[in-house]
Amino acid sequence: MKRLWAPAWLLALLLVLAFMGSLAFGEVRLAPPEVLHVLMGRGEGLARTVVLDFRLPRALVGMAVGAGLAASGVLMQSFFRNPLASPGLLGVSTGGALGAVAALALGWASNSVFALPAASIAGAFLATFAVMALAKREASAEHLLLAGVALNALFGAATSFILNLTAGQFEVTGQIVFWMLGGLENRTWAHVWMVLPGTVLGCLLLLPFGRALNLLSLGEQGAQSLGVNVRQLQWEIIALSTILTALATAVGGVIGFVGLVVPHILRLGFGPDHRRLLPLSMIGGAAFVLACDLITRFLPGELRLGVVTALLGGPFFLWMLRRPA
């Protein structure tokens, strides 16, 4: 436990700094004391409106998205026993994207704030069910990986087809492109309640999985011989990873590299023990997304969150590929 507390405190400090920065910086800049007064219920006027109505929901959604994607990344890397695995490997992200794009193209999203997230979650779960069906109900890594590659390509093509059909509808096309690039703009308290309870519950359910994931890293036969119900554990990993990724995609759009980069950096820094890696990745993922979202506010051209995470995660991914085993 002592080995957990030091990095946990460090990451928690980074998360607090990113959280306060998210509440303080933007078109209207607020001093930290102003933000603290609002959070303690003593603020008023413009500062109160800016923090409580706009920036606090955006920050809470960003924390939930980051924690969920990072935790899902840990699960996928453990399942496939490969540090290059990511939450989108089984097609969950592209399935969620297809559902959201369909909702935008059909006009459902303009009728209700819940329509787009609901369609995205439905698409994500459709992708998981399709992957399992293609894998012939075998939860082996090989079958699922091949099925995931096929579904990613199919759902990506379907998304491009819908985008092509709406090419003449400039407003709809703009909404689709902006959503596919990922972002936390215009998040409301409705989005907070969509993503936060499910993500917190999913992360809490994951915390006791640390020992079983450590044993799974020894291989299926080794874990089975040490008392792990491997088949049940694999189904639980797939279910929880799907839920966390679906929720994140539903409210944040397609945000890549969080589930790949954050767990891998923490694994390099603090070791592969999943009893530490899971909680640290949740904290680190939340801090990473908030920091990237904060960067978008300082760069010209309204750069999207998904672009920033890709610009940071892409070079890191290439470095991992060239790094000696």
Image (cartoon, grey):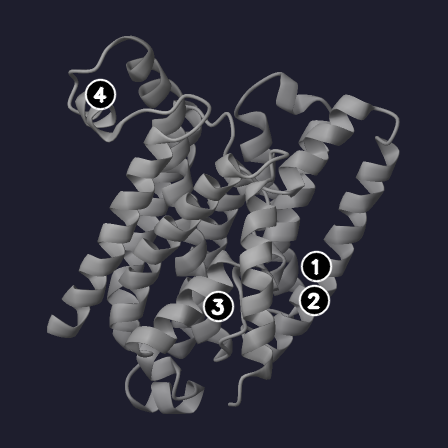
In terms of secondary structure, where does tag 3 sit?
helix
The residue at which mark 4 appears reads as: 38
Residue marked by disc 2: 149
Residue 140 can be seen in this image: no
- The mark lying in front, picked from 4 and 3, is 4
Task: Answer with mark 4 or mark 3, whichever residue precedes in sequence.
Answer: 4
Q: Which residue is under mark 1?
A: 152
**Residue 175 in view (yes/no):** yes
Task: Look at label 4 and name its amino acid.
Answer: Val
**Dot 1, how many residues are within 10 Å of its Cα: few (below 14), some (14-19), or many (20+)?**
many
Which label lies toward us, 4 or 2? 4
* Foreground of the two, 208 or 304: 304
Q: Callout 4: few (<14), some (14-19), or many (20+) C-alpha neighbours within 10 Å?
A: some
Quarter occupied by residue 90: bottom right
Q: Are marks 1 and 2 in contact (CB under 8 Å)?
A: yes
Report how far apart the C-alphas of labels 1 and 4 lie in the structure.
44 Å
Q: How many marks?
A: 4
User: CB under 8 Å between callouts 2 and 3?
Assistant: no
Q: Which disc is residue 76 wearing?
A: 3
Q: In 3D space, how far apart are the residues under numbered discs 4 and 2 (Cα atoms)?
A: 47 Å
Cα distance in 3D space between marks 3 and 1? 16 Å
- Circle 1 SS class: helix
- Identity, as a three-letter code, of the amino acid under mark 3: Met
Determine the residue positioned at 43% across, 24% down.
188
Q: Secondary structure at mark 2?
A: helix
